[in-house]
């Protein structure tokens, strides 16, 4: 009985060693494949620099004035998208417009606004995200009593020309 137990234990141990050896072999093959891909594509290089911005600090540095309406600051831009910080005091209005070639994703950090999207009025408040496809008419008015702070991601990157007011 003791010999059977020892033989079973050795068989289980050998099976575990074989499984671990196979996993290591697979990991090594994956690493080799990944390194080969990195050499071909040069994944560690880009024509666009890495950007890290603290939006809270940036928002505190920017002043907003009711007579100027919404303040739009480009935070980052790359080949496929641009990121903007949009701020405005209560009462600020962004007139109705559309983007002919660009989609826009807007995320509300702070404050509140009434967004008019294709004639439908939607309240946007902190934590809300809105996707606005190209050619969709939209505008906003800051409501409530605190400064609105939005992140606007536009793809392809916004060039300053594709905002057509109506």
Image: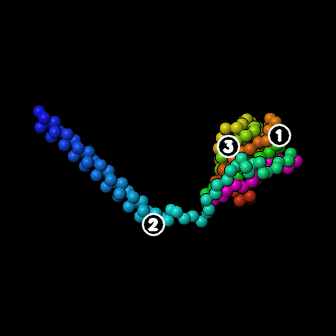
Q: CA distance from mark 1 to mark 3?
A: 18 Å
Q: Is residue 119 visible?
A: no
Mark positioned earlier in the residue sequence (1 or 3): 1
Residue 131 locus on image (x, y percent): 65, 44
Q: Which residue is under mark 2?
A: 39
Q: Which residue is under mark 1?
A: 90
Q: Are marks 3 and 2 in contact (CB under 8 Å)?
A: no
Q: Is residue 63 visible?
A: yes
Q: CA distance from mark 2 to mark 1?
A: 52 Å
Q: Residue furthest front?
A: 2
Q: Residue at x 80, y 35 (%)?
A: 144
**Quarter occupied by the N terminus:** top left
Q: Residues within 10 Å of mark 2 (few under 14, many from 20)?
A: few
Front: mark 3 or 2: 2
Range of magenta residues: 67-78
Residue 46 locus on image (x, y percent): 57, 64
Label 2 secondary element: helix
Q: Which residue is under mark 3?
A: 107
What is the number of the mark on residue 71?
A: none
Mark positioned earlier in the residue sequence (3 or 2): 2
Count all numbered tags in the image, as a single digit: 3
Residue 152 locus on image (x, y percent): 69, 48
Label 3 secondary element: strand
């Amino acid at each position: 009985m003791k010999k059977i137990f020892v033989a079973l234990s050795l068989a289980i141990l050998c099976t575990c060693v074989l499984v671990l050896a196979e996993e290591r072999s697979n990991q090594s093959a994956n690493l080799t494949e990944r390194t080969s891909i990195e050499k071909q594509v040069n994944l560690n290089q880009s024509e666009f620099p890495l950007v890290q911005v603290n939006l809270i600090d940036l928002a505190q540095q920017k002043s907003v004035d009711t007579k100027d309406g919404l303040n739009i600051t480009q935070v980052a831009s790359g080949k496929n998208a641009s990121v903007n910080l949009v701020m405005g005091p209560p009462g600020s209005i962004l007139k109705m417009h559309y983007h002919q070639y660009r989609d826009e994703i807007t995320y509300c950090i702070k404050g509140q606004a009434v967004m008019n999207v294709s004639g439908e009025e939607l309240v946007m408040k902190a934590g809300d995200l809105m996707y606005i496809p190209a050619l969709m008419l939209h505008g906003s008015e800051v409501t409530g009593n605190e400064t609105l702070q939005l992140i606007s991601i536009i793809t392809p990157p916004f060039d300053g020309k594709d905002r057509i007011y109506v």
